[in-house]
Image (tube, rainbow, N blue to C red):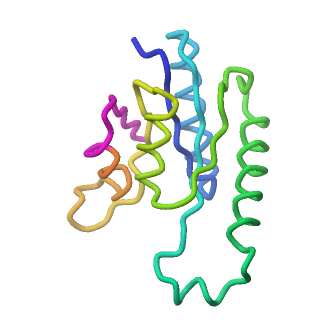
Amino acid sequence: MFKSILLPLDLGDEAEAKRLFTAANDMARTMGAKLHVLTVIPTFSMPMVASFFPADYEKKALAQGYDALAAFVAGQGGAENVANQIVGHGSVYKEIVKAAEETKSDAIILGPGSAESGDYLLGHNAARVMRHATCSVVLLRS
């Protein structure tokens, strides 16, 4: 059914990341699909906030993001099925949608994220990805 699957992960929630990786990896293996794994390093939303951090903070954060994603994937069963490991930088939902387009993914697998008022038990990034993605979005509830 799917040929290319994007799996965005929040590495700050290791239990959820493992749950999603296992499910996405099983799905990709069953379908013979490529699995692309993504994490996103958020950017500062206000220049004033950025002024409180060292000039090379974002560069170091990206390097740490690559290392953390590589370590996470290497620690999972089935890591050999991962076609790409991607670290985005910026708005979380925009980076997910961009990565899906760049990898020509026909599905994005998401967890529900944290619910905020008005999103009816769906986190704001998951809701935005579902609205803006041009491919299928599979929401895996726990």
Q: Residue at x 38, y 55 (%)?
A: 125
Say above or below: 67 vs 53. Answer: above
Q: Residue at x 59, y 60 (%)?
A: 41
For the residue pair 121 and 6, the one nearer the viewer reads as 6
Instruction: Give the mark count.
Output: 0
Q: Residue at x 55, y 86 (%)?
A: 49
Question: Is residue 114 covered in magenta?
Answer: no
Task: Give the percent coordinates (x, y) of residue 98.
Answer: 45, 43
Task: Give the percent coordinates (x, y) of residue 104.
Answer: 46, 26
Tell me where residue 91 sits by quadrant: bottom left
Task: Give the percent coordinates (x, y) of residue 29.
Answer: 58, 14
For the residue pair 32 and 55, the one nearer the viewer reads as 55
Question: Is residue 136 covered in magenta?
Answer: yes
Give the magenta range.
130-142
- If the image is split into quadrants, where does the N terminus sit? top left
In the displayed structure, does residue 134 sit left or right of residue 35? left
- If the image is split into quadrants, where does the C terminus sit? top left
Tell me where residue 109 sits by quadrant: top left
Say above or below: 135 vs 18. Answer: above
Task: Give the percent coordinates (x, y) of residue 66.
Answer: 73, 50
Q: Residue at x 52, y 84 (%)?
A: 47
